[in-house]
Image: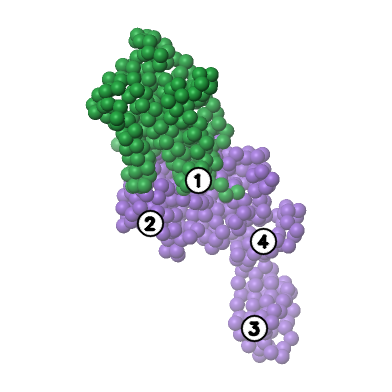
Chain colours: A purple, B green
Amino acid sequence: MEDVVIEVNQLRRSYGEFEAVRGVSLAIGRGELFALLGTNGAGKTTTIEALEGLQRPTSGEVRVLGLDPIADRSAVRPRTGVMLQHGGFTGALTVRETIESWRALTVRPRATRDMLETVELADRADVAVEQLSGGEGRRLELALAVMGRPEVLFLDEPTTGMDPASRRRTWDVIRELQAGGTTILLTTHYLEEAEVLADRVAIMQGGHIVSRGTPEEVVHTLPARITFRSPEGSDLPDLPHGTLSVDGDRVAYETRDLQGDLSQLLDWATATGVRLYGLSARPATLEDVFLDIAGEHDNAGHRLEREEVR
Amino acid sequence: MTTVTTDRAARPSWQMLALLRMELLALRRNWTATALSVVTPLLIGLLLTSGYGGQTVPGVRRVVSVTALIMVFVVHHHLTTVYASRRQENVLKRMRVGLPSDRTILLGTASSTVLTFLAQTAVLALYAILVLDLPVPRHPLVILFALLLGAAVMAAFAAVLSAVTRSSEAAMLTTLPSMVIFLATPGALLPLGALPAPIERVLWFLPTGPFTEMLRVGWLAQTDEGRALGFWDSHLLALPSAGVLLVWLVIGAWLTRRFFRWEPRHV
């Protein structure tokens, strides 16, 4: 990767006794959209806040555009946009006043009307910020983050609390920026969001990155699934790449070769005249990866075995 | 317009103006805060000074002591709640990911409160001169300098105490000790000469001691013992007071650096 815009090197960050991030490394190239996935407390926010210059690393190093976000604050800030996880508004101000206030603090800001239309808040311009719904508030946050046409954009759970329409709108805004060459790091616990938007993802758990790659690569670490309802009175076949599990009347095969195993299964069904009710075959989703990892770690007596999962 | 904006958004003075505008907007919207920080102290101040019409020395002393009272209430107590609520709303945190430096954010957030205090002082002074028939201040520069330094000290300690203040209600408690300390100074809420001289001399070193002395000297151009002072003597006499206030300011700024919290407590 030639043009690394966001770099994290062995980042550790403790709050008193609690170590929130335990040795995270990342390199994100120009124009890339990278998603940090994880449940609450996985260390996503601490990682992104270290990059925003809000948290000082306990050890390790972070670089944005080749600069230290704390030491080189005044050089970095005009080139980055940030959407925090929570609020950041004086509630009594209206949407328009908030946008105008932040425009005064932004280098080469986009026009107020443009911002209002981008995040579809034009009809709410004169409403006090404290009256906004959760999704509208998040969209206003997004407007402030992208106001200065940043080279690098940090979005901490941008769509949390949004209704589906708001979420789509936010995705559109993010995609437009991505198409314009903005480097974007976002955190989310919505797997769908990462699958739809991200060039690469990393899954965080307990302060570590436990899996990373393109969404496809991460998904490929897990087998696909074939499921159907248990047919009566017939022995189920062995599939060459699949492992069988039966849960009540649900039959499930986990397979590394979905196409091969599926045709064998269907051949068997045709030959024996068995009808497979509720048949479904699908590749693993990030959701599976996520649950798989979360499950493993919750059972693994916590912190010891994390590195092995990689 | 776009090209001009480029430069100014990065300029601290412009950022401070933007923050001042934001705070004034918020003050205009929030009537409780406005009444509490603007109207009430002023009304009390006017009430406490009426009845001193024509009595030059006691009158000016009273006006000065009321000025200290307003300053402690507005620039210390009220500003503590402003810092605390901007922190709880995550406004301070959001500001920190933008262009302004930490210092600009702190000063900008305090600016509307300090301006409010200066405006209250101006109204009080006009009232004293026009209605109470007290003399016109002799050395406005000394007075202005005292007001700015005093307000800066109060603001610095407001920033420090906001770190342990979760809400406006909590501020009643957290700023109580400091308000008592700041007001229990001869010349502030205690009349001059009410305490034994040695105690008074020690208490003078609290911020409102030199603050009120500078105001009295600047207004009357005479010492508290009644010795008339020329132009240079008045300014010279103000120097030790200004020095003590500066020391307090350095202490306050250092404590702010050390203890100020930018984020709500959640970890």
Which circle marks residue A131 in the picture?
2
| Circles 1 and 3 on the same subunit | no
Q: Chain of mark 4?
A: A
Q: What amino acid is labelled 4 in the image?
A: Ala
Q: CB atoms at circles 2 and 4 under 8 Å apart?
A: no
Counting residues from the N terminus, which is met first, the one under dot 3 or under dot 4? 3
Q: What amino acid is labelled 3 in the image?
A: Arg
Residue A158 makes an appearance in the image = yes
Which circle marks residue A294 in the picture?
4
Q: What amino acid is labelled 2 in the image?
A: Gln
Q: CB atoms at circles 4 and 1 under 8 Å apart?
A: no
Quarter of the image for residue A269 reads: bottom right
Q: CB atoms at circles 1 and 3 under 8 Å apart?
A: no
Mark 1–mark 3 Cα distance, whole angstroms, equals 61 Å
Mark 1 sits on what residue?
B170
Helix, strand or loop for disc 2: helix
Residue, x 32% and y 24% (percent of image)? Answer: B59
Mark 3 sits on what residue?
A229
Position of the N terminus of chain A by quadrant: top right
Mark 2–mark 4 Cα distance, whole angstroms, equals 37 Å
Helix, strand or loop for disc 3: strand
Counting residues from the N terminus, which is met first, the one under dot 3 or under dot 2? 2
Label 2 or label 4, whichever lies nearer to me, is 2
Q: Chain of mark 1?
A: B
Q: Chain of mark 2?
A: A
Q: Is residue A223 above or below residue A131?
A: below
Q: Residues within 10 Å of mark 3 (few under 14, many from 20)?
A: some
Which sits in the foreground, A150 or A200?
A150
Label 3 or label 4, whichever lies nearer to me, is 4
Q: Residues within 10 Å of mark 4 (few under 14, many from 20)?
A: some
Label 3 or label 2, whichever lies nearer to me, is 2
Residue, x 39% and y 27% (percent of image)? Answer: B65
